[in-house]
Structure formats: structure tokens, C-alpha cells
Image (cartoon, rainbow, N blue to C red):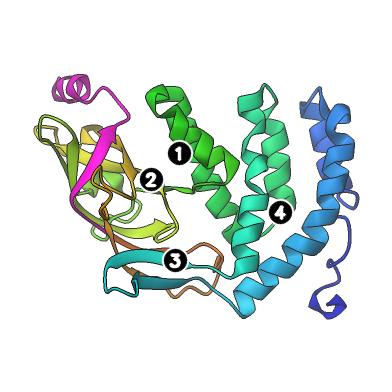
Amino acid sequence: MRALSYAYGTNHFSQDIVLQDVLRHFWPQFEAHEADLTRFGSIAGREVYETVYHVDHDAPPVLVQHNLDGKRIDRARLSPSHLALLKALAFINRPPYDGDSWHHHFAYGYLIGDPGLYCVLTITQQVAYAIHKYAPEFAEWKEALLSGRAFGATWMTEVQGGSDLGANQTTARFDGEVWRLTGDKYFASGAGLTDYAIATARPEGAPSGPKGLALFLVPRLRKDRSLNFHVRRLKDKSATRAVPSGEVEFVDTEASSVTNTSAFITRSKT
């Protein structure tokens, strides 16, 4: 395994004097967590390094669209070591919610190093944060995300607009009980792995452009436990292979508003 890299088997925290200086300068509680980061630096240099190398070279995620009974499931199959590592690293998202600092979380992420592996953890964090700040009624989902029992994603990009979210065409219609989204997300990181996503859509009556978009929380399963969205395919990427990115289709997909959507529409029209 030593042939992987000169960095393999080293302590990524102990070797990074610049990181230590930055944390010491901006994080008053740094010294209380220095031993923990040193321990994590050793894990990043060995267990994390081995797994991401294995995933990138030998075992990228694979989309499984049907189960043995022919039922559509659209799940990403990960290498067992990949999945085990993601669950083991879920704790890096918890510090800000346990009274600790965001510095702690970002230091962990920096030490992981691999953008594909950290992407899954980051988009999971973003869904947990949206629930924490805007939708506390879904606290049970937030806890599942922070504990590694579920994964999150942020789905914004559509083929006609790319980074121009104002061109998004996914629509949101309220049926009296839930919001229903219809449209495609063209570059959806975490596709097939995600249990709870946050996605942009344009409510009926909202104006065009970015000001007409609202944010919605989308579970993988509907209330009747059927599949809530479909994954058309995974992207064949040359980098960040540890995160399964793909194309997601919404067809009357059940969703909950993360914003006060009625007020949002009214405000957008003025």
C-alpha cells in the first residue's frame, strides 16, 4: 500500500503546519481539540486514503434500478468499505449542533482531502442545516442525517441553465396536502444514495428568474412508501467518483416547503 502515494500512512494533520496556524489564529478553542484532530489526521492518512483510492480505481458507485422482483428502486450500490467509511465519518457533521464550532467541522473536511467522499458528507450537512434552521418539525430526519443512518443532497442544476438557477423549469404545485414537484435535475450529486434532498422548484404563480424559486425538502419515499423520484442514470466522471452524481426525474414528487412559500410568491411579485 505504500506505493499508493508518499502521503499514504502519514498523519495529515501533524504534517500541515499551515492548517494548525490558521486554526490557532481563528479558533479560540483549537488547543482543546488538537489531540482529536491529530488522531483524525492519522485516520485520514491511512483508512480514508485506502478507501478513496479503492473507490476511484476499482469500485465506483453503480446504479441498481430494479430489485429482484422487478420493482424500481434506483439505488446506488457502493463498495462495502466505501459505505462503512461514510457512516463512520458521519460524526464530522455533528459539532455545530452539539455546541461546538464550525471550525471543527471544516477542519475534519479539509483533512479528508478527497472531494468526492467529502461531497457526500457536505451535501448531507446542508440538508441537516436547512432542517435545523427552517424546518425543525423534521428533527427526526436531521438526526438520521447527522448519525449516518441517512444521506442528504442538494439538487439545483438543470440542463437548460447549468449554474444559472434562474433558468430552472422544475415546477411546484400544492395539492392541498403536500407540494408536488415536476421536472428534471441534470447534475444531482448523491443520486441513488440520497434519503432526503433539498431541491429548488418554481411554485405556481411565482415569477420567472431566480427570485421565483423556492426551496423544498424531498424524501426518497412517498407517504405510501413508494419511490418518490427516479434516477435516470449516473454520470461517468473523471473525478469525484466517490459521489454518485446523476440525473433525477421528478413526476408529482411529494415535497415539503422549507420556506413560507405563500409569502414567498407574494413577495416575489412585488
Mark 1 neighbour density, 10 Å: few (under 14) some (14–19) many (20 or more): many
x, y percentage for residue 108? 72, 44
Q: In the figure, is residue 21 to the left or right of 98? A: right
Real-space Cα distance between discs 2 and 3? 15 Å
Q: Are marks 1 and 2 in contact (CB under 8 Å)?
A: yes
Looking at the image, tell me whether mark 3 or mark 4 is earlier in sequence order.
3
Tell which tag, 4 or 2, sits nearer the viewer.
2
Looking at the image, tell me whether mark 2 or mark 3 is earlier in sequence order.
3
Which quadrant: the C terminus?
A: top left
Q: Which residue is mark 1?
A: 127
Which quadrant: the N terminus?
A: bottom right
Question: Where is 150 relative to 114, above or below?
Answer: above
Local SS, label 4: helix
Disc 4 residue type (three-letter): Ile
Q: Which residue is mark 3?
A: 76
Q: Which residue is mark 4?
A: 112
Mark 3 neighbour density, 10 Å: few (under 14) some (14–19) many (20 or more): many
Looking at the image, tell me whether mark 1 or mark 3 is earlier in sequence order.
3
**Which segment is the magenta one?**
249-270
Dot label at residue 197: 2
- State the residue in front, 267 or 186: 186
Question: Where is 3 relative to 22, above or below?
Answer: below
Tell which tag, 2 or 3, sits nearer the viewer.
3
Question: Where is 266 relative to 168, above or below?
Answer: above
Real-space Cα distance between discs 4 and 1? 20 Å
Disc 3 residue type (three-letter): Ala
